[in-house]
Image (cartoon, rainbow, N blue to C red):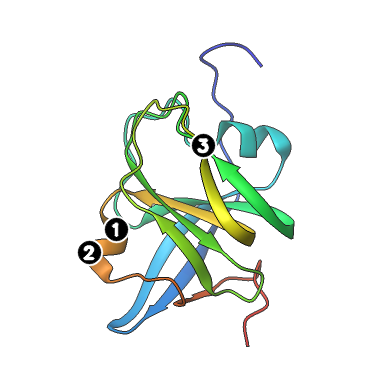
Amino acid sequence: MFAGSAVYAVSVQPLEIVTKTGVRVFSVEMATTEAEKTTGLMYRKELPEGKGMLFDFTPEQEVSMWMKNTYIPLDMIFIRADGRILRIAENTEPLSTKIIPSRGLAKGVLEVIAGTAQKYGIRPGDLVAHPLFHTK
């Protein structure tokens, strides 16, 4: 990949998070290929509210993320195979190479604009509804 180039995920799908205060719907780009997962939201200057990127880490595994070449502060929501939120790394630091671990097995990671989790009361244990997850 060339420096400064960006690979954008082509598939956009709806994703719902069921919180204590209601259901929040997001429009997410899917990062399923290695190139899409490696690039993620790097080099982008904005991410509108209600939009995000969902990383597919099938099969469920320990996941590590970082903010290298990412200019937008993000909330990273680590999601188990059953659709339950495992962990939320809020307000991640732009351009940081600090490793952000899942701290458990995750099948997906949802990246949204920083402050989203707090704004909507999204918490660990909340349910994410999307075909990637085997929700009950």
Which residue, given by chain and number where applicable, does mark 2 sit on? Answer: 119
Relative to 22, 14 lies left or right: right
Residue underneath mark 1: 116
Which amino acid, by three-letter code, is at mark 3?
A: Ile
SS at mark 1 in the image: helix
In the image, is 131 to the left or to the right of 13? right
Rendering coords of residue 98 (x, y %): 46, 32
User: How far apart in space, not on screen, are marks 3 and 2 (Cα)?
Assistant: 25 Å
Residue plotted at (74% across, 57% down): 58
- The percent coordinates of residue 115 (x first, y second) are 25, 54
Pointer 1 with pointer 2, Cβ within 8 A: yes
The answer for how far apart the CA atoms under marks 3 and 1 are is 21 Å
Residues under labels 1 and 2: Cα distance?
A: 5 Å
Q: Nearer the viewer, mark 3 or mark 1?
A: 3
Q: Secondary structure at mark 3?
A: loop
Q: Position of residue 100 (x, y in %)?
A: 49, 43
User: Which numbered disc, 3 or 2, marks the residue that appears first in the sequence?
Assistant: 3
